[in-house]
Image (cartoon, helix red, strand yellow):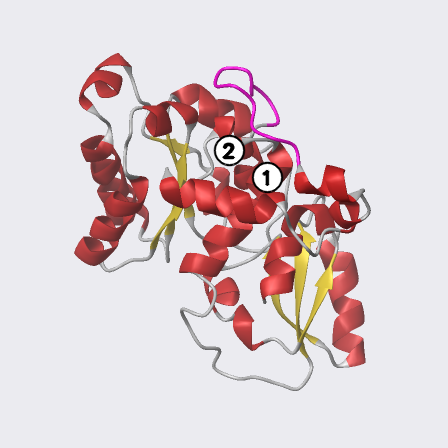
Amino acid sequence: MGALNSKMDAVFDEPGCAINQGKSGKARKKGCSKPLAPGAAAGGCAFDGAKIALQPVTDVVHLVHGPIACEGNSWDNRHAASSGPTLYRTGFTTDIGELDVVYGGEKRLFKAIREVIEKYDPPAVFVYQTCVTALIGDDVEAVCQAASARFGKPVIPVNAPGFAGSKNLGNKLAGEALLDYVIGSEEPEVTTPCDINIYGEYNLAGELWQVKPLFDRLGIRLLANISGDARYRDIACSHRARAAMMVCSKALINLARKM
């Protein structure tokens, strides 16, 4: 939990957030909304925020490590559209039960990662921590690291259990996961002086497809859209963009600033 606490401290006092900077000095020290008590964060929790921020990445497996209700309540609540892969439309969960709470769920998670890689062969697997697995002490980062070494695929831990805080905090923690494990891990085949990234655009009802043709006519190449209709490789190569545009600044302002 130490790594999670350090991430939370950073995003609670985001210098790029106009809302936070517009507060008085005393209020600014409080940062963003503080975590709710475990069990009181149902709906709009940090896990939900992380899931909806990353779910539109279309070609990866999104594996929820927790009870099946966590996946059921968060699946497809954004209706993000895809121009190609549909793997993101399939829900995956380790379906933690009572025995897993007693004995730990790390082995179950490792087996689930192996199963989805063998069956679907995705370019990457995103693993989401939830309240239950965080409270019983499952080390998601260690399991993901071991699975990545074993199967030769990027396995990305998204450490944003629901009790950590609000949905907006989960959005930011999702951005931190991309910075730590994805962005910069690959190089684009070609770069241009007019490569840009868009942050906080989820292609709801295909809205990205209305904007992209305008960029094409202007000679501007969209290197990565994070995260609507995105591919894993696009995000991995997005560090080579020359400029960035923000759509939802409250969600991923930390990612845009650090890029």
Can you say which quadrant of the picture contains the N terminus?
Answer: top left
Q: Please give left or right for residue 201 compared with residue 51 in the image.
A: right
Q: Please give left or right for residue 68 compared with residue 228 in the image.
A: left
Q: Is the magenta stretch mostly helix, strand or loop?
A: loop
Check residue 169 in the rendering and tell me which mark sits there, or answer none.
1
Query: Residue 110 location in percent, x, y?
Result: 22, 39
Residue extent of the magenta highlight: 32-44
Relative depth, front residue between 201 and 19: 19
Query: Residue 89 location in percent, x, y?
Result: 50, 39
Relative depth, front residue between 244 and 36: 36
Above or below, 220 against 109 in this view is: below
The answer to whether mark 1 and mark 2 are in CB contact below 8 A is no
| Magenta residue check for 33 | yes
The amino acid type of the residue labelled 2 equals Phe
Query: Residue 224 location in percent, x, y?
Result: 59, 65
Q: Please give left or right for residue 225 compared with residue 107 in the image.
A: right
Which residue is located at x 20 percent, y 57 percent?
149
Image-quadrant location for residue 134: top left
SS assignment at label 1: helix
Q: Which residue position holds label 2?
A: 47
| Magenta residue check for 9 | no
SS assignment at label 2: helix
The amino acid type of the residue labelled 1 equals Leu
Q: Please give left or right for residue 97 compared with residue 74 in the image.
A: left
